[in-house]
Image: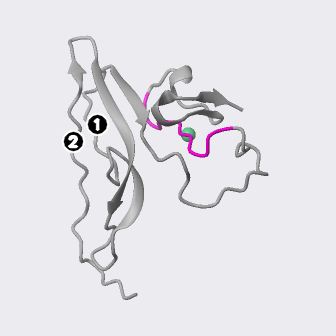
Amino acid sequence: MNMRKFMDPLPIPPVLKPTFRSENYTYYEVTMKETKQALHHDMPETTIWGYEGIYPGPTIEVVQGEKVFVKWMNDLPEHYLFPIDHTVHGAEKEIPDVRTVVHLHGGQTEPESDGYPDAWFSKGFDKFGSF
Ligand SMILES: [Cu+2]
């Protein structure tokens, strides 16, 4: 495959509109979805898992000091894109194949809301836990 340079403009993610905004806080909902997207002009579409179904995910614009809540929702398929080695810690067969958790760098996030490394939830919050 010959991938030519400078074929695509720099991707600028769209700005996400809040679900709710008041004088005290702003609330967003972001859904993780599987979609198809071409990541380069010379490549065919490929399967991606993206926030709001795009990669990179949307931008959340925040004014300094603004309090923001985000509800991260998992609407990914129930089975992973690739084979899973169930002998690895954290990938046991008893837990859902596809689990997610969101972690933020650069914000002032309360620890219980910042995606502990072992925390997870499955599609539709059907199951959740930590190891
Ligand atoms: Cu981190």
Tell me which amino acid carries mark 2.
Val
- 55 sits to left or right of 100: left
Depth check, front residue: 26 or 109: 26
Residue that numbered label 2 is attached to? 15
- 105 sits to left or right of 27: right
Residue that numbered label 1 is attached to? 60
- 39 sits to left or right of 123: left
Q: How many marks?
A: 2
User: Where does residue 95 sit, x and y in percent of width and height?
Assistant: 67, 38
User: Where does residue 88 sit, x and y in percent of width and height?
Assistant: 76, 50
The region drawn magenta spans: 95-107
Q: SS for tag 2? A: loop
Label 2: few (<14), some or many (≥20) within 10 Å? few
Q: Does 81 sit above or below residue 7?
A: above
The earlier-in-sequence mark between 1 and 2 is 2
> Which numbered dot is residue 25?
none
Q: CA distance from mark 1 to mark 2?
A: 6 Å
Depth check, front residue: 37 or 63: 37
Residue at image position (58%, 34%) is 120
Residue at image position (61%, 46%) is 97
Q: Quadrant of the C terminus?
A: top right
